[in-house]
Amino acid sequence: MASPVVSVVMGSDSDLEIMMEAAKSLSEFGIPHEVQILSAHRSPERVTRFCKRVKKRGIKVVIAGAGGAAHLAGVIAAHTTVPVIGVPINSSALGGLDSLLSTVQMPSGIPVATVAIGKSGAQNAGVLAAQILSLGSKALEAKLAKHKEKLARSVIEKNNKLRKKSS
């Protein structure tokens, strides 16, 4: 098995169902990845160690999901030059709005590419990681083009079904 080039991390095991959507997207593109739990608040030393080794380990993109205060993506981005994609998790009474704001409102110079709240955001994070990696891979670029074609075909198929039902 190839060494991972994307690290999918989350603040808690309660985020796993959502973050597995990112892993699923990566798998569909054949991108080697790892999945692990890191907490910016409960295990800050572990997060720091992760960040110090991430580039040396060959990780090219980090996808970080967290709910509530959602500081994980920002903490990682502060410690590395590897691109970080933040996935806000809808884990609180605020429906993920708190997570979205915590993830997207980064100070100048510490970017976190932030996707939508929840499962669709996690899935898009995997696709965005693939797009970043495709800048150096014609094979991955071709897989992404096929992915876009598949999306377009699904819309046409759905429209055709709708037409048949309404006539």
Image (spheres, rainbow, N blue to C red):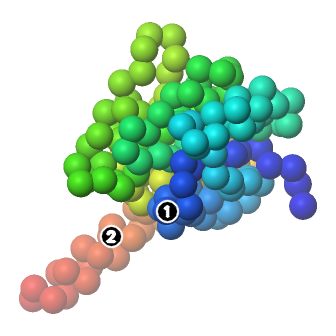
Mark 1 surroundings within 10 Å by alpha-carbon count, few (fewer than 14), some (14 through 19), many (20 or more):
some
Image height of 110 relative to 102, above or below: above
Residue at x-position 80% and y-position 49%: 4
Q: Is residue 134 visible?
A: no
Q: Looking at the picture, which amino acid does disc 1 mark?
A: Ser
Image height of 131 relative to 165, above or below: above
Residue 133 at x, y percent in the picture: 68, 39
Cα distance in 3D space between marks 1 and 2: 36 Å
Image height of 93 relative to 61, above or below: below
The part of the image, by quadrant, that contains residue 13 is: bottom right
Residue 140 at x, y percent in the picture: 70, 48
Q: Is residue 24 visible?
A: yes
Mark 2 surroundings within 10 Å by alpha-carbon count, few (fewer than 14), some (14 through 19), many (20 or more):
few
Residue at x-position 19% and y-position 80%: 162
Viewer-nearest residue: 74 or 49: 49
Q: Tag on residue 14?
A: 1
Residue at x-position 58% and y-position 42%: 42
Give the farthest residue toward the right.
1
Q: Tag on residue 156?
A: 2
Residue 43 at x, y percent in the picture: 64, 40
Between disc 1 and disc 2, the foreground one is 1
Q: Looking at the picture, which amino acid does disc 2 mark?
A: Ile
Give the farthest residue toward the left.
167
Residue at x-position 68% and y-position 55%: 35
Q: How many marks?
A: 2
Viewer-nearest residue: 85 or 149: 85
Image height of 41 relative to 108, above or below: below
| In the displayed structure image, the side of residue 8 where residue 120 appears, left or right | left
The part of the image, by quadrant, that contains residue 84 is: top right
Mark found first going from the N terminus, 1 or 2: 1
* Quadrant in which the N terminus appears: bottom right
| Helix, strand or loop at mark 1 | helix
